[in-house]
Amino acid sequence: MNSLIKIILLVSVLFPSTSSSKIGGAMSVGFMSEKIPLTLLDFTGYYSPNQKTEFFATFSYLVFGGGLGLGAKYYFIDKNKISPFASVGFSASVAGDTIESYVGPHIAVGYSISFRKIIEEFGIDEIFNIVINTGYGYAFYNDCDNCGYPFLNGEVKFEFGADYFGI
């Protein structure tokens, strides 16, 4: 419990609430993900304290399984531009005919290709964005000799200013 309090205090100091804070949701479709390794389709809620950081909670779906995950994603340039990123998280998934479980932390690095500029040219509001994420991740699951995985997914995002929700 003390560790959790320390993490929350550290995050609140490093990422204070500002007028650029956003709360949003996303849906992604593709092969694996930086947010949760075992997925074909996932739904995500996130908090973004600035243009470079997202904290997320994800629910994923597989044909024979699914999972839940929590984590953070850091964009080295800006989440609304083409940007390299690093992601870290913890997930729990079940998959397969025999319902095997996969629980543990995971990390990923990759590129995020945002289509925000093109969308804005069509006069669509800035709360909407389409992104392609690609890269390589590694899951630290038990009984896994080589848990590295490539990922490629398309993501549709909606976000609102945190003040919209009174945060």
Image: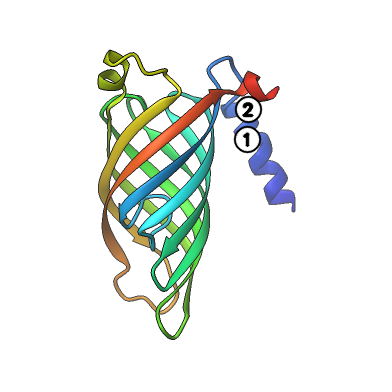
Instruction: Confirm or deny contact between disc 1 and disc 2 (CB under 8 A).
Output: yes
> Which one is in front, 56 or 146?
56
- Residue 100: give its label: none
**Does residue 44 show up?**
yes
Q: Secondary structure at mark 1?
A: helix
Query: From this viewpoint, which residue is outermost toward the bottom?
Result: 98
Q: CA distance from mark 1 to mark 2?
A: 5 Å
Work out whether 30 lies above or below 141.
above
Residue drawn at x 57%, y 28% is 14
Would residue 165 appear left or right of 49 to someone viewing this image?
right
**Residue 29: image x %, image y %?**
34, 50
**Residue 77: image x %, image y %?**
32, 25
Work out whether 6 lies above or below 141.
above
Q: Amino acid at mark 1?
A: Leu
Q: Quadrant of the C terminus?
A: top right
Residue drawn at x 74%, y 50% is 2
Q: Amino acid at mark 2?
A: Val
- Residue 10: give its label: 1
**Residue 27: image x %, image y %?**
42, 44
> Which one is in front, 11 or 55?
55
Q: Secondary structure at mark 2?
A: helix
> Which one is in front, 102 or 61?
61
Q: To which quarter of the image does residue 80 belong?
A: top left
Residue beneath disc 2:
13
Residue drawn at x 27%, y 14% is 121
